[in-house]
Amino acid sequence: MGMTGDGACEMIHKPEHTVDPETGAIIAAGVRPGDAGDTADLSARIIEAVELVEGDHAQ
């Protein structure tokens, strides 16, 4: 629960995804709490996406 931009109280969340800039392919997707900062764990999400892509290329 949280406050929206117009002051209403409701369930808030932010869908986020990691995209390969060369192909436009979605590498990872998730839903984060609406009050979580966008950059709070950005580095970890980037590393996870790189590992996913590199793991796929190794197979």
Image (cartoon, rainbow, N blue to C red):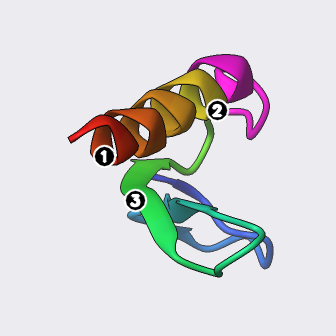
Mark 2 or 3, nearer chain start: 3
Q: Is 57 situated left or right of 37 in this image? A: left
Q: Position of residue 30 (x, y in %)?
A: 37, 54
Tell which residue pokes out farthest to the front in this image: 58
- Residue 12 in view, yes or no: no
Q: Position of residue 59 (x, y in %)?
A: 20, 41
Residue ID at (48%, 71%): 26
The residue beneath circle 3 is 29
Front position in the image: 47 or 16: 47
* Residue 42 position (above or below residue 25): above
The residue beneath circle 1 is 56
Front position in the image: 22 or 2: 22
**Is mark 3 in CB contact (under 8 Å) with mark 1?**
no
How packed mark 1 is, by other alpha carbons closer than 10 Å (few <14, some 14-19, many 20 or more), is few
Residue ID at (38%, 45%): 57
Of the residues shown, which amino acid type is indicated by label 3? Answer: Ala
Residue range highlighted in magenta? 37-44
Q: Quadrant of residue 44?
A: top right
* Residue 34 position (above or below residue 5): above
Task: Check disc 3 and report its element: helix, strand or loop.
Answer: strand
